[in-house]
Each structure stands twice: as structure tokens, then as C-alpha cells.
Amino acid sequence: MKFAVIGNPISHSLSPVMHRANFNSLGLDDTYEALNIPIEDFHLIKEIISKKELDGFNITIPHKERIIPYLDHVDEQAINAGAVNTVLIKD
């Protein structure tokens, strides 16, 4: 499976290192990468979701609120918080 953390800036994130270490320790071939998407290019997230390039992703600043209109379903807790942290891409 393919996963990522999406934000801007994102190069400082330890998420890829931590997730890859966990995948390796469990004997999984899953991947986890950092994707830097600037605010002006955030519309590209629609393509990432629709093409199912990832199985899921974490979203961080400055996009936690910006992602909501691009999602088919938003959990009640995320609605109440007005922000999203994790996105699962399903068929």
C-alpha cells in the first residue's frame, strides 16, 4: 500500500521515517512519503484522490481545513474540529 504525509513545508516531518520503520519491522512492503504541496497548487489534491495514487494520507498544515471540500465523507469529529488529519482513499 502507498501512504504519504501532505503539507507545506513538509521536509522536516519525521512521519516517513517512523512509518517506514514500522512497515519494515512488520515485514510489509508498504511505502510512506512526504509530499510538499504549496497552497497555490492544492487543487492538485483532487487528482491525487481521484486517480487513487495513494491508499491514504495524513494531512498537515496548512491544509487541514482546506482538504474538507475535496472529501466525499468527513467524520463527525473532523467536522466539529473543522480540520482533518487522516484521509483514507477507498473505491
Image (cartoon, helix red, strand yellow):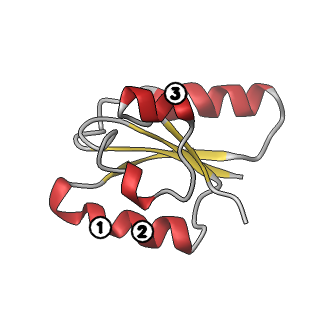
Task: Give the amino acid type for the residue marked by disc 3 in the picture.
Answer: Gln
Mark 3 or 2 closer to N-term? 2
Give the foreground label among 3 and 2. Answer: 3
In the rendered structure, are the residues bearing label 1 and label 2 in contact, judged by CB atoms less than 8 Å apart?
Answer: yes
User: Which residue lies under the disc numbered 2?
Assistant: 46
- Residue that extends furthest to the left in the rendered view of this protein: 40
Left or right placement of residue 31 versus residue 58 in this view: right
- Disc 3/disc 1 C-alpha distance (Å): 24 Å
Task: Give the amino acid type for the residue marked by disc 1 in the picture.
Answer: His
Badge 1 marks a residue whose secondary structure is helix
Mark 3 or 1 closer to N-term? 1
Left or right placement of residue 66 versus residue 84 in this view: left
In the rendered structure, are the residues bearing label 3 and label 2 in contact, judged by CB atoms less than 8 Å apart?
Answer: no
User: Which residue lies under the disc numbered 3?
Assistant: 77
**Image x and y of residue 37, in percent:** 28, 55
Looking at the rendered structure, which numbered label has been put on residue 43? 1
**Image x and y of residue 88, in percent:** 62, 48
Give the foreground label among 3 and 1. Answer: 3
**Image x and y of residue 68, in percent:** 40, 49
Locate residue 19: give its quadrant. top right
- Disc 1/disc 2 C-alpha distance (Å): 6 Å
Residue nearer the viewer, 9 or 40: 40
Residue nearer the viewer, 85 or 21: 85
Task: Give the amino acid type for the residue marked by disc 2 in the picture.
Answer: Lys
Residue displayed at 39% across by 26% down = 81
